[in-house]
Image: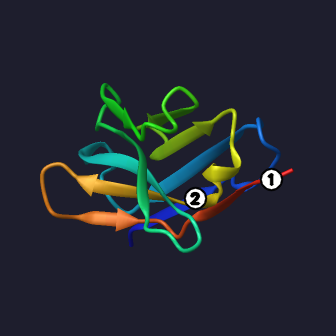
Amino acid sequence: QVRLAESGGGLVQPGGSLRLSCVTSGFTFGDYALAWFRQAPGKEREFVASISRYGRATSYLDSVRGRFAISRDNAENTVYLQMNNLKPEDTAVYYCKASALPGPSVYWGQGTQVTVSS
């Protein structure tokens, strides 16, 4: 059974930091690219960051580049998102996504809430 479990969200003041984790099971982690998406109230879900199978390539949403860092631990089947200098506009539910390379399989987690507010 495929499972992606996000954790690490919470309430943080502007300028603060959070580290999100997504622990996975039920599929061959190293065969998948991983990504983080987010969805704010009343908005479409948007891409935040992605990382290739072995972590050699990363990509970021322009508004988070330089503040967020995605990483993965293939031994622990876990992907991380380090978020620094958080801003109120980063408030959203954050989801991790696994995409097979190659192949059509796509898996999503249930999300973790991040709220940036003073």
Which residue: 55% across, 41% down?
A: 81
To which residue does mark 2 refer?
A: 6
The 10 Å Cα crowd at callout 2, few under 14, some 14 to 19, many 20 or more, is many
- Tell me the amino acid under the disc marked 1: Ser
Q: Position of residue 2 (x, y in %)?
A: 39, 68
Q: Is residue 88 above or below residue 55?
A: below
To which residue does mark 1 refer?
A: 117
Which residue: 31% across, 25% down?
A: 56
Q: In this rendering, would 68 be left or right of 102?
A: right
Give the quadrant of residue 50.
top left
Q: Is residue 118 above or below residue 51?
A: below
Q: In this rendering, would 19 be left or right of 117?
A: left
Q: Position of residue 48 (x, y in %)?
A: 45, 47
- Callout 1–callout 2 Cβ contact below 8 Å: no
Using the image, tell me which numbered label, if any, was put on residue 18.
Answer: none
Give the quadrant of residue 52.
top left
